[in-house]
Amino acid sequence: MAVAQSTNRKRTPTPPQAAYTFERFIKGRGNDLACSACQAVAEAPGRAYNPLFIYGKVGLGKTHLLYAIVNEAERRRASHKVIYITSERFAIELVQSLRQGRTAEFRRTFRRTDILLIDDIHFFQNKEGTQEELFHTFNELHGSGRQVVLSSDRPPEELAAMEERLVSRFRWGMVADIQPPDYETRLAILTAKAEESGLELDYELLSLIAGRITSSVRALEGALTRVAAYMELQGLAPQREVLAKIIAQDPQGEPPLDVERIKAEVARRYGVSVHQLEGKGREKRISQARHIAMYLARELTASSFPTIGASFGRRDHTTVMHACRKVKALAETPIFQSEIEDLKRRLTAPR
Ligand code: ADP
Ligand code: MG
């Protein structure tokens, strides 16, 4: 039976699953809880949280975490039987076993495992037969203290076409969500992935990608892959403007952050008007806000110094360069630094 993608018969998982480990999973505010819960389950299956229900939008690391449990559990206890399966595969195998009169074998496989991980459980909606089977499998495993891990693109209560008795069981243990990564996490993920693939990209370019691509980790990986392809062809790292174009090719990419939005956000934050930011006023409060807005425009958009200058009341590019240097120097102090980081976070939060 071709069900078990990973059992103790096959101790070394094959790529890409092998790469999906906890070591390679970057923790951040959005996934910290889910990751810790998965680690706890891998260390003490059936005892930590049972079931463990992980949910989050596509490309945020659910499958990675499930495989990390598989890899870790196998590393620790070779005698443990572990099955990872997608919901789709589970449904297909069930139908086939029914057709071929092999349901007993099907049940044996799933009900004798020590850890059962089912990915993308939302796929079971409207599939009554499959839900029925899962219900009994769940009871058998849970009842005898064996571990069940489920992933879904939405929380249990939003699984509309799912039997209530299943939904309530999903909530017996721990429900943990994964939120899109914040700016710092995106930067950390990009840095780690660039290093893993031997891509030499400096901080400035990585932070530009982190500022632009906010939707998912998969989108970040996609951008890095395109940058890698460019570097392979050209033999050098892209300039900021080119990089911005490469990033913009992302079909799911966000509309790029523009200087206007930065001005609006900075103005709001410092209680000045956009008009004042663009104007000639030299009052300290205004000029400092102006410098910060220029700096953020340079950091978070692909705009050149002259372009930024032009959008701040036709100032010269040297004025912008001067402002950026000034803010960089100020950012050496912790308080000011966290202020800037906070602004960056706001501006690059998923919209
Ligand atoms: P999902 O199953 O939620 O759709 P995946 O687990 O397939 O998402 O993740 C998409 C890609 O992003 C994978 O290549 C995965 O390794 C990577 N990824 C997701 N989250 C992280 C993270 N926190 N650290 C490192 N890589 C991650
Ligand atoms: Mg997945």
Image: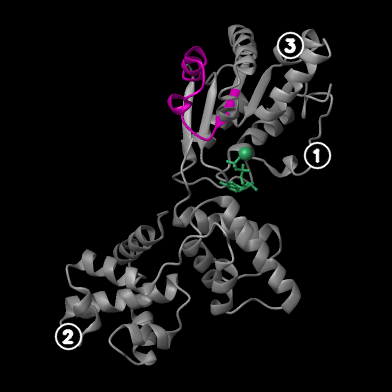
Magenta extent: 149-171
**Between marks 3 and 2 in the image, the one whose residue lies nearer the viewer:** 3
Q: Is residue 202 magenta?
A: no
Q: CA distance from mark 1 to mark 3?
A: 25 Å
How many marks are shown on the rendered structure? Answer: 3
What residue type is disc 2 on? Gly
Q: Residue drawn at (65%, 13%), measured in percent from left and top?
A: 133
What residue sits right under mark 1 in the picture? 14
* Left or right side of 63 for 209: left
Q: Is residue 164 magenta?
A: yes
What residue type is disc 1 on? Thr
What residue sits right under mark 3 in the picture? 107
Question: Circle 2 sits in a helix, a strand or a loop, which is it?
Answer: loop
Of labels 3 and 2, earlier in sequence is 3
Q: Nearer the viewer, residue 318 or 60?
A: 60
Judge whether residue 339 can be spotted in this image.
yes
* Quadrant of the rendering where the N terminus is positioned: top right
Q: CA distance from mark 3 to mark 2?
A: 76 Å
What residue type is disc 3 on? Arg
Whole-percent x, y for residue 281 in the image: 17, 85
Q: Residue drawn at (40%, 55%), measured in percent from left and top?
A: 349
* Left or right side of 70 for 299: left
